[in-house]
Amino acid sequence: MCGIISYIGKEDALQVLTCGLKRLEYRGYDSAGIAIGDDKHPFQVVRSVGRVEQLIQRISSLSLSGKVGIGHTRWATHGGISEKNAHPQTSQDGKFLLVHNGVIENYASLKTMLTKEGFTFSSDTDTEILVNLIAFYYQKLQEVPADKRFVESVRESLLKVQGTYGLVILCTDYPQELIGARKSSPLILGVSEDGLFLASDASAFSGQTKEVVFLRDHEIAHLKGHDFQITDLSNNLSSPVIETLEANTDESDLGPYAHYMQKEIFEQDQALQNTILGRFSADGSSAHLGGLQMTARELKKIERMVLIGCGTAWHACKVGEFLLETYARIPVEVEYASEFRYRNMPLEKNTLVLVVSQSGETLDTLGALQEARRKGFRTLAITNVVGSTIARESDGGVYQRSGKEVGVASTKAFTGQLATFIMLSLHLGRMRDLSFSEGCRLVKALQSLPEITRSVLNACDPIMKELAKKYASSAHFYFLGRQALFPIAMEGALKLKEISYIHAEAYPSGELKHGPIALIDPSMPTMVLASNADMLSKNISSMMEIKARGGKVLALGVQGSIIPETVCDELCVLPKVHEAILPIVTTLPLQLFAYYMALERGCDVDKPRNLAKSVTVE
Ligand code: AGP
């Protein structure tokens, strides 16, 4: 959450920052700001509430110059959405300018201390306290040699701070320098011939350089002109490793689509093709996943798995639970990342902890991963973003290769995670008691996925568009599903909530009669996921219960299973597919439904209110 881009070099900083901020907007879009200057131009700060575009409009009437700058796009944590709370935050003496991602947890005690020292504050942010803390130490450290005073003030301050930060700070006394630091929030140093970048994500300087240094927690990067030095909080010098990022095709072009979410829904056939590409054994009965970093012997020893994620990734884990238990016969538990790290869950010796995160940066998931490692467990990660913190900190894992996901509501990343779970279940299952023929059936099902995905999307698109027209005014929605389709019902409800702001809840179909049915009336529609043929009679019973109470039923059925017209108001029929890929196929119409519902209600599909793509605060 919150995006940071900063630059020092030969280029005009304004261009670099505005370009970077546009690319980082997925991390937060409440407000944005920049500070630009250098040794010839005094630093100027411009901030604005709203999207980066609004900031750019404001800048267009100003004349900003300089080859050094910091920029920020915000997702509010401390303090409401207002210009005074936007970043950069400035110290009281005007010398220090700070952009920050994270939360300073001991802000209250630091504020009390600074207030006693005569500091006053004009925003409601924890960031303003931090920037003044740095100014405070700067005043105190007058004895420190001039070339060290800036960096030592930052170091001294960070030693007093509890919480999380990815930050970049500049000081007007040192107009050719920038300092960046991180703790549990990503910060990446980009190195090019023309300058240095510090950003919360390498995409911010994409096209400028592929040479990067991933800063580690507690490291401070001190950029001076074209040189940089990295130290830790105890002032030990680090030897930075410059890594070259893989070439990234620019996927930010919308092409014929109106929104990224629509584009990402419709590119799922290709994304799934990429996920499975080259990952099957030569005999066509198993999958091989090179990045697990575990021998067959180690994999066979796994007695239990704990799957961890947040939001949509957690739903993927819930489907993963079914798949792993069914095909690999490994007992699985699924945990919310935010809960796992604060529980003291008894974990037996041969437990494998697997975290799932599209971005690879979600702080709750990272915290859970670190907690599992601290306890000595072998950890794996399913991630989409190559080189992300979670990918780097886990013992091994699988890249889902779904391609860049821009829309805040996750679509293709979810189906990619499900396909990855099928491959993992197949891989582990074939080492246990999954038969050769069932292995072959699973491989064939996976290979058929891209084509099925394309035809289901094409067939469901007009149906869901029409349904959205009819149901867009609903204030509430239920989603029901059984077994592996219950997590899909949860995902369908989450998508609807996220982008159309309709209150939606999901239940296992059988739970309806245990309480939720009390809300059924003509104004409460229910989407019933009845595409698992073996559960048809049970699903029909649930629909009858709803109809008997005047509720509206929208059903997802499957070819060959007859759902009488009397028990549903709307019916969308999906093709009959292997049960392992059914959760993916059933997800597709729900994504389209949420998308069209949001459009009907005039919502901003790609940037829904209050949300950000990557949640890097607790
Ligand atoms: C999905 O639509 C959400 N925006 C959200 O629930 C997301 O899946 C969650 O924050 C986890 O993100 P991650 O996969 O990047 O860790």
Image (tube, helix red, strand yellow):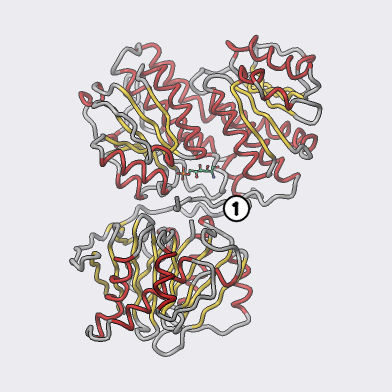
Residue drawn at point x = 43 percent, y = 70 percent? 112
Q: Amino acid at mark 1?
A: Asn
The residue indicated by pointer 1 is: 610
Q: Quadrant of residue 287?
A: top left
- Which residue corresponds to the image point at 42% horizontal and 53% vertical from the top-left? 248
Q: Position of residue 257 (x, y in %)?
A: 64, 48
Q: Residue 405's spot in the image, x, y percent?
A: 51, 47
The answer to whether any part of residue 51 appears in the image is yes
Secondary structure state at the residue bearing disc 1: loop
**Residue 442 lies in quadrant:** top left
Instruction: Please state if 271 lies on the left or on the right of 147 as rendered.
Output: right
Q: Is residue 288 above or below residue 362?
A: above
Task: Pinpoint residue 467: horizontal percent, then vertical percent.
Answer: 76, 33
Front position in the image: 604 or 155:
155
Q: Residues within 10 Å of mark 1 (few under 14, many from 20)?
A: few
Report x, y in % for residue 416. 47, 35
Tell me: 4 left or right of 375: right
Examine the rendered structure and indicate whether residue 284 appears above or below residue 340.
above
User: Can residue 256 be seen by looking at this rendering?
Assistant: no
